[in-house]
Image: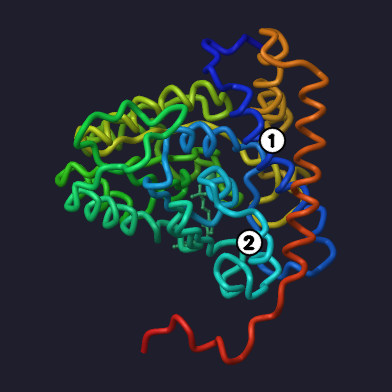
Amino acid sequence: MTAMSQAPADLKHLYYQMLRIRRAEEAIARRYAEQQMRCPTHLCIGEEAIAIGVCAHLTTQDKVFSNHRGHGHYLAKGGDLPRLLAELYGFAEGCCGGRGGSMHLTDLAAGFIASTPIVGGTVPLAAGYAWAEQMKKSVTAQGGASAAGGRTPGATNVVVIFFGDGCFEEGVMHETMNFAVLKKLPLLFICENNQYSVMTPLAERQPKRDIYKIAAAHGLTAVSGDGNRVDDVYELAQAAVANARNGLGPQFLELHTHRWPEHCGPNEDDDLGYRNPGELAEWKLRCPLLQTRQVLLAERLSNDAELAHMETKLAEEIEQAFARALQGSRPTIERMGQHLYA
Ligand SMILES: Cc1ncc(C[n+]2csc(CCOP(=O)(O)OP(=O)(O)O)c2C)c(N)n1
Ligand SMILES: [Mg+2]
């Protein structure tokens, strides 16, 4: 395994954030068997580098839209962990009031607008939001500490839409790219290409060509990269966010990655045989956390004791988050009519 090309200054922080998603999702998977979380749950274990490498460049004024596999996006954007867990348990204290479960997340204070399970459903919503931002010519109030994406005076807030390779097959995806280019929207399309839509591999669903080149043909600035290397994602996203912020129109990143667990649920499913033999094992060697940890140690940016301390700290945070979530209450019948328009 080669060393990462160029370690971003805050690689340790990026590692910590990825580890936080991993450990939180592992805890969700463990507790799922208790049968108290009753909503379908799509875990992003193996894909953490994309959410973290992209959201590292966003402020709370920037907005994120997501899909069915949204826990990582929500946490990377600063979404509240206890409220995510309470949502999975269906409690009124959940981020969606216990109405939505894992696939309907929102944290407006963090700038995480919405995730929905309908594949492609949030794509035009993100474009609409980006159009509004453009009309308002809103200037991001916060400077953004580590990396605010090369902001210049008059720059706009940006909107990010995360979606999968399966979503790229939806008609609305292409309508939205067309419109985004036409209007030069400050919108980032982040395609998490994990090669599968449920159990069907890409080769059985799309002709052999690069997804990002189709986006480029629509007129977007489009590139592809290794979605399992957080430094790669970080660098590509830095340029893309700066471009979108500074009026250069919509940007498209196709990031290659792999989901480790089953499509939906807390378990492994490699025994089902829809993946190529050895494919999952190969991707596990390319684990985004493992690769980053190796760089941190090799370049003496961290040490075993510090990495162990991160684990302890996260274990405590996650334990406390579950304890808090589990104090939640069931939604009452009186609340059923709220937020409905008829
Ligand atoms: C419009 C629509 N069609 C089908 C489904 C069923 N479905 C849920 S997730 C999914 C796979 C999506 O694959 P991809 O976009 O690559 O995301 P991934 O699950 O790989 O992260 C499908 C087909 C759906 N939710 N919505
Ligand atoms: Mg996919």
Q: Which mark is residue 83?
A: 2
Q: Secondary structure at mark 2?
A: helix
Relative to 40, residue 157 above or below? above
Q: Quadrant of the N terminus?
A: top right
For disc 1, the neighbor class at 10 Å (few under 14, some 14 to 19, many from 20) is some
- Marks 2,1: beta carbons within 8 A: no
> Residue 321's image quarter?
bottom right
The residue at the point 25 percent across, 43 percent down is: 139
> Residue 141's image quarter?
top left
Q: Position of residue 26 (x, y in %)?
A: 76, 46
Relative to 272, residue 152 above or below? above
Which amino acid type is shown beneath numbered disc 2? Answer: Arg
Relative to 213, residue 185 above or below? below
The residue at the point 68 percent across, 31 percent down is: 279
Q: Is residue 293 left or right of residue 193?
A: right
The residue at the point 34 percent across, 35 percent down is: 252
Q: Is residue 125 left or right of residue 33?
A: left
Q: Is residue 254 left or right of residue 29?
A: left
Q: Position of residue 222 (x, y in %)?
A: 31, 30
Residue topped by disc 1: 19
Give the alpha-carbon distance from disc 2 to disc 1, as whole Å. 19 Å
